[in-house]
Amino acid sequence: MKKQTIGFVALLLASTSWALAEDVPIEGTVQSRCVIQTDTAGVYGNPNAYTLTTDPSDGGALAIIRFDVTLADAYKAEITAPSSFSSSPPLPDVVTWTGDTEVDAVSDASGMGSYETDKVEQGLKDIYDLTATGSTWFKTSSVATMGGSKAFPGGNYTALVVAECIAQ
Amino acid sequence: MVKWIIMFLLVSFPVLAHEMTPTYPKLEPSHLDNVYKTTMEMFNKREEVEYYEIGVFDAEWKPIPFVTKYEIIKIRYLGHVTFDVYIRKQDVSRATYVCSMSKLRKDATTKTAIASRICSKFK
């Protein structure tokens, strides 16, 4: 009788545990979006005293930015190469800036193949219509030249590439 | 082949992303008279960025007055934030874009060289 009671209580507890089990929902929403991913921050090389450049052959590294869009014809990518240092030592002269952005790779060669030829250039800013869904990698180069062939002072230099994804 | 290259790139590099939704937010009347609001959501996957600045602009990129809980929002790495943007009724017809832009710390040890900005367009 005692064994039967213990068995009954154990069964009751087990069934109670089952009764307390609940479904825990994981919710999500799928909606159109643009995601900017900073794959590689650029690095300046210093091939001579008066030049800083992201050219890999001069010891630099290009900035690589990836745009992911899930809705075609909804966004423009605007990428602006630097036109000033955000931090640097005191500079002895005016710096001249050049820079350019190009498509580095695409996830859909047929839909995105014309991005580079169709881009609009406004000085240091390059504008691309993101007409297809998927990922596009852009590479941005930058060259800073010190005026009067003066040398860049020693120290850390940082300049910003601005990557914008603008709904249209 | 292209897919394999994309997979390689995804696996090879740390992905540092900034996203904001929806793409086309709608301004709707709020609980306050003559004030409209919309709700936006942001996701921060940029480990080196903690703060994002919110801005509202017209079609000519001139700033439009608005109110949010914080104009500069702190979002931890891998964090989601939902925030409301309030705009006066008189500015609703001019309001075109709501944007979020990464703010980089000057003393950051990471020499980040990319500032990201995402702009949604009011419908």
Image (tube, coloured by chain):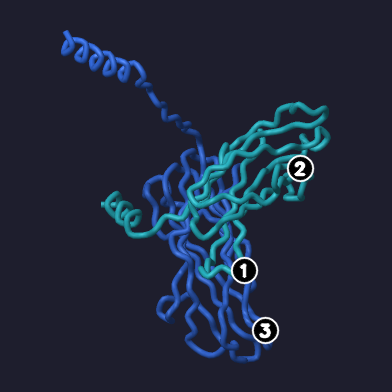
Chain colours: A blue, B cyan
Q: Nearer the viewer, mark 1 or mark 3?
A: 1
For the point 74% across and 37% down, the residue is B86
Element type at mark 3 = loop
Nearest to the observer: residue B7 or residue B74: B74
Whether B64 is drawn above or below A97: the answer is: above
Residue A105 lies left or right of residue A87; in this view the side is left
- Identified by mark 3, the residue type is Pro
Percent across and percent down for residue A80 are: 59, 62
Q: CA distance from mark 1 to mark 3?
A: 16 Å
> Which residue in the structure is indicated by mark 3?
A90
Circle 2 marks a residue in which chain? B
Judge the density around disc 1: few (<14), some (14-19), many (≥20) Cα neighbours within 10 Å: few
**What's the residue at 76%, 26% (across, down)?**
B31
> Is the same chain shared between marks 2 and 3?
no
> Which residue, given by chain and number where applicable, does mark 2 sit on?
B66
Q: Quadrant of the C terminus of chain B?
A: top right
Q: Chain of mark 3?
A: A
Report the side of A56 relative to A79 (left or right). Answer: left
Residue placed most toward the observer, B13 or A32: B13
Circle nearer the viewer, 2 or 1 = 1
> Helix, strand, or loop for circle 1?
loop
Q: Amino acid at mark 1?
A: Lys
Question: Residue visible at 55% across and 52% down?
Answer: A77
The residue at which mark 1 appears reads as: B106
Residue A4 drawn above or below residue B22: above
**Above or below, A17 relative to B82:** above
